[in-house]
Image (cartoon, helix red, strand yellow):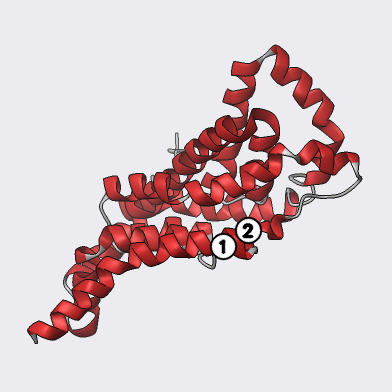
Amino acid sequence: MSDMTQPAPPAGVKRHLPLITILAMAVIGFFTLRDYLTFDTLRDNREALLLFRDSNYALMVLGFVAIYVTIVAFSLPGAAVASVTGGFLFGLWGGTAFNVLSATIGATAIFLAARAGLGRALSAKLETSEGTMKRLMEGLRENEVSVLFLLRLVPAVPFFVANLLPALVGVKFRNFVWTTALGIIPGAIVYTSIGVGLGEVFDRGEDPDLSLLWAPQVIGPILGLAALAALPIVIKALRGKKDF
């Protein structure tokens, strides 16, 4: 009787499976879900969602967090819609709390998946590098928290990149988690606040204006926080030049 069992994948391949799964789901989700995770879907189902929330608040919270975590963890389309939905369903403070919690958990999942595979090998290689790369790694170690905050506060950095890049260069897990949770709060408040007034927007037959994030009165304070995060890096650089 022949052995019909399939050979187990090599250990190296196993380490990459979580990240491969995430990337595959991201591609599949982009083509299959982008027409469903939209404000039109939310508009069509808003009465049912509000009714369910009023009768099953805890279950609605758990369902919302689970869906949002899945969206972030697999980099599916609809993260902005989910953030706005948080404000629509739970108000400014509850929505912000649930948005930040969900996004942090999802981001942590990507970080761990990347670090378990590609990140482990790449960070080990960078640790033994020389020249410019070694100096960059030393600079990252000295300014790890500031760099992580910058990745979260600078709007031009895609959320997926801010989740993946730290894992590939070997930043500390605890620093990644707490800087993510704090660093995404300003943007979360903006998106959640849009959701608070979403019912009136729908009643006018309009879609929410997500360009509010780029309004001077909004982007200005966020960039100010980014500047504060960068200040320790600048100070260390200036001190290094003086010492030299």
Helix or strand or loop: what does disc 2 sit on?
A: helix
The residue positioned 49% from the left and 54% from the top of the image is: 20
Q: What residue type is labelled 2?
A: Leu
Are the residues at dot 2 and dot 1 in contact (C-beta closer than 8 Å)?
A: yes
Label 1: which residue? 219
The quarter holding residue 69 reads top right
In the rendered image, the residue lying farthest to the left is: 243
For marks 2 and 1, give the CA distance.
6 Å
Residue 116 rendering spot, x and y as whole percentages: 33, 50
Q: Nearer the viewer, residue 113 or 50?
A: 50
From what the image shows, is residue 111 above or below residue 223?
Answer: above
How far across and down, in percent of the image, does residue 30 sit? 68, 55
**In front: 78, or 208?**
208
Q: In which quarter of the image is residue 169?
A: bottom left
Q: Classify residue 109 as left or right of residue 172.
A: right
Task: Please give the residue where the numbered disc 2 appears in the rendered image.
Answer: 213
Give the percent coordinates (x, y) of residue 225: 42, 60
Question: Residue extending furthest top?
Answer: 55
- Of label 2 and label 1, which has the lower sequence position? 2
Place residue 47 in its image quadrant: top right
Instruction: Label 1: state its secondary structure.
Output: helix
Q: Write the residue at 75% across / 55% down.
A: 209
Disc 1 marks a residue whose amino acid type is Ile
How packed is label 1: few (under 14 Cα within 10 Å), some, or many (20 or more)?
some
Residue 195 visible in the snapshot:
yes
Q: In this view, does 117 lie above or below 135?
A: above
- Label 2: how many Cα within 10 Å (few below 14, some 14–19, many 20+): some
Residue 28 location in percent, x, y?
66, 53
